[in-house]
Amino acid sequence: FTDTDESKLDGIEALADVTDATNVASAGALMTSGGTVTGDINFGDNDKAIFGAGSDLQIWHSGGSSIIKDAGTGTLWIGGSSEIALGNPDITEYFVRCFDNGAVNLYYDHAAKLATTSSGVDVTGTVTTDGLTSSAAIVSQTGGSNSAPAIAITSGSLGVNGITAPSANTLGFVTGTGERMRLTSAGRLGLGISSPSAGLHVEDDNGAIISRSGYSQYLQ
């Protein structure tokens, strides 16, 4: 090589110094010790972004599905400072919302259906189950009313029918928004009367009938 050639090679070597962050960045590359990306990083199908010494966390697209795989030990954590949300690709509808120190909400077609609360869960809509086991009272609320029983058996076109708790240790049985029978705390059963004075107290303008097959006895 001539002296001129050596000078050219020295210049190329200086420009190709891959230990210099400025040179590497100007070439559109990253230092192995880190750097800043100002554009997209594109991965082909089944090309993975792999993290951890044992390839513990892997993210890729298979061509049909997008996959996040925790292939190592320990827990896969997803943390958010105030809220974590899962939703549709347009970021316009929720599937799940998780709030820091608050509720976790599950959605159906962007409508919240189940939310955790400080005391349990709040369900919006109808619960369908093939079994139910409870360690406490299944229904626990105020006594209700004849128009809105505490335990509503039917409503709508079938009418308002159910059970109320009009006072302590007392049950009222409602049909068509009217109380028809009451069982008191003393064990007295009243038909047509809310304050029965005997074990069985029937009050009706038409009297009462006690019968067996083929025989009837009228009480006036």
Image (cartoon, helix red, strand yellow):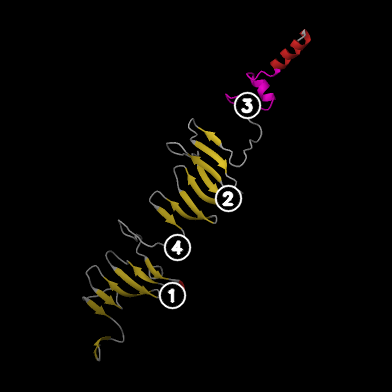
Q: Secondary structure at mark 1?
A: helix
Q: How many dots with numbers?
A: 4
Queried whether the magenta region covers residue 161, the answer comes back as no
| Amino acid type, label 4 | Thr
Q: Earlier in the sequence, mark 1 or mark 3?
A: 3
Residue at the far bottom in the pictured view: 214
**Residues at marks 2 and 4, CA–CA distance in whole angstroms:** 25 Å
Q: Which residue is mark 1?
A: 158
Please give the label number shown on residue 126: 4
Residue 97 in the figure: left or right of residue 174: right
Residue at the far front in the pictured view: 1
In the image, 39 versus 107, the foreground residue is 39
Q: Look at the image and tell me in which quarter the N terminus lies.
A: top right
| Amino acid type, label 1 | Leu
Vertical arrangement, residue 60 with respect to residue 17, above or below: below
Residue that appears at 58% across and 41% down? 46
Q: Main secondary structure of the magenta part?
A: loop
In the image, 197 versus 120, the foreground residue is 120
Please give the label number shown on residue 88: 2
Extent of the magenta region: 15-34
**Residues at marks 3 and 4, CA–CA distance in whole angstroms:** 55 Å
Nearer the camera: disc 2 or disc 1:
2
Residue that appears at 40% across and 48% down? 118
Q: Position of residue 200 (x, y in %)?
A: 23, 77
Q: Earlier in the sequence, mark 1 or mark 4?
A: 4
Q: Earlier in the sequence, mark 2 or mark 3?
A: 3
Queried whether the magenta region covers residue 30, the answer comes back as yes
Q: Which residue is mark 3?
A: 30
